[in-house]
Image (spheres, rainbow, N blue to C red):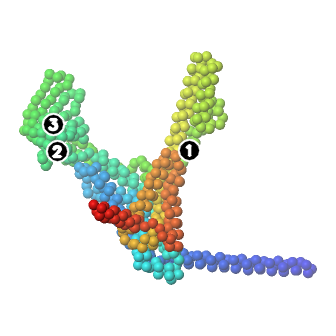
Amino acid sequence: MQGPLFLFFGLSNCAGLIKLYLCKFQIDCMKKLKQVIQKIYYYSGGWIGARYIFRELISPFFFSISVVTFVLLMNFLLKEIDRLLGKELPVWVILEWIYLNMAWIIALAVPMAVLVASIMAYGRLAEDNEIVAMRSSGISFIGILTPAIFFGIIVTVLMVLFQNNVLPDYNHRARLLTGDIYHKKPGLTIEPGYFIDDMEGYSIYIKEKKDELLLNMIIYKDDPDKVQTTIYADSGRIEVQGTNVVISLFDGEIHELDLIKPDKYRRMYFTKHKIGIPVDDMILERREQGRRGDREMNISMMKKQVETFLESKEKIAMKIQEIAKEQLDIHHYKNLKEIKKTIDARIDSNNQVLSEAKAKIENRRLEGIFNRIKTETNMIQNYQKKVNKYMVEIHKKISMPFACLVFVLIGTPLGVMSRKGGIAQGAVTSILFFLIYYVFLIGGEELADMAIISPFIAMWAPNFLLLGVGIYLIYSATFEVRTFDILEAFNLTKKIKERKGKSNHAGG
């Protein structure tokens, strides 16, 4: 009887000890979790210095966005404004066109603005020895950088949402409106010395133009089946009235030649003559819907397209396998080169074994099979390029916003080490890193579209490269390792040139 009681009490004590240890483990875990949360809160904005750094980042961030957006917008307008001239577009259409194109401009401006803001904010803090004061009070360098990292994470998340939910729709609407504007025929865009062929059925030549008055006009009316009409006028005007072009001519003559009966020729003089030409495209016709390109789709839309292309690719691969099995008795299709070797070997064998006539027929059949397989293989490659094109855009919608966080990791230590918070330092440095980033991004996109490298590597390689640079710069700033200063390099180059100039002057 004592044995079972002893076993019962022993198990009860073990259960109690296990329960006690579990409770203690749970309490320890909760304490550690609470400490982690407190640290995150502390460094991301819970301490007064973090909130101060946030305020220092926000002002240069919005200032940089404004400047970069303005520069990109002006560059865009200078390239595209000539296509809008002479369209007689309402002001609200032009404003809408600019507004819709602002989406992709902002998508480019934000990462650069983050880099400039980080350099300016931390450069100003370092210049005023506030970074030194923070570190002297016991705050680690990583703790000082954490508010900027948290800021970069917020901007990254917002830009991912913007790239996926806002930018595709704006790109689509901007493309439709741009196409509608470009298809609208010009109103009074007349250049002397050139033929105007914008109005169907008429070809107009003007020798001179004085304000709105056109001098020495020749008008050819195209009517090849009936009458050829040529009009000469000393002067005239061209006006747009609704959907019609009205040509008013003064002091001229009309020549009409019957093409069926050339002997019938008429010549008429006039002091004033008007021609009305209906042109439907003179008004702007707006389209509300249209086919979407890869940059006009969100991630879910592009994934559906990728699935469709992969299914088509798989069907073609199965088709090639069937052709190789049925026509060539090849049960395991490898690639086009292996098929070519097999067919060439059979053609050589046919030339040796079969008669000339039979060998010619059989060889022609083999060549037809090879051409068919080659065509199907090219289709597979084309589908793979389309898959890569959409996968590039999918990765880009995440990798470009992630660049905001990468630029924070670069900009904050650069600002601390440069100890300069001016716009010059931020602008010069940001342009340099942006050139590096976009050269790799554009080059990677081209290689991925040609199916040379994977879309993931193409879109994320610039981020990984600059992330490594950022980690090195943080290490250098943490342990106060001196690094290369861009502005100092420019100053050094300037000093060298000045010295050479002085030496040359002294030598002369």
Tag 1 and tag 2, C-beta contact below 8 Å: no
Badge 3 or badge 2: first in the primary sequence: 3
Residue at the far front in the pictured view: 507
**Amino acid at the residue labelled 1:** Glu
Look at the image and tell me in which quarter the C terminus lies: bottom left
Label 2 sits on a secondary structure element that is: strand
Residue pointed to by mark 2: 238
Badge 1 or badge 3: first in the primary sequence: 3
Q: CA distance from mark 1 to mark 3?
A: 60 Å
Label 3 sits on a secondary structure element that is: strand
Q: Position of residue 351 (x, y in %)?
A: 60, 21
Q: Position of residue 481 (x, y in %)?
A: 50, 71
Tag 1 and tag 3, C-beta contact below 8 Å: no
- 309 in relation to 375, above or below: below
Tag 3 and tag 2, C-beta contact below 8 Å: no
Is 163 or 108 nearer to us in this picture? 108
- 58 in relation to 332, above or below: below
Residue pointed to by mark 1: 311
Q: Which residue is painted at 46% across and 54% down in the image?
A: 440
Badge 1 or badge 2: first in the primary sequence: 2
Q: Which residue is painted at 18% across and 22% down in the image?
A: 261
Judge the density around disc 1: few (<14), some (14-19), many (≥20) Cα neighbours within 10 Å.
few
Q: CA distance from mark 1 to mark 2?
A: 57 Å
Residue pointed to by mark 3: 218
Q: CA distance from mark 3 to mark 2?
A: 13 Å
**Amino acid at the residue labelled 3:** Ile
- 22 in relation to 75, above or below: below
Label 1 sits on a secondary structure element that is: helix
Camera-near label (3 vs 2) is: 3
Q: Quadrant of residue 12?
A: bottom right
Judge the density around disc 2: few (<14), some (14-19), many (≥20) Cα neighbours within 10 Å.
some
Camera-near label (1 vs 3) is: 3
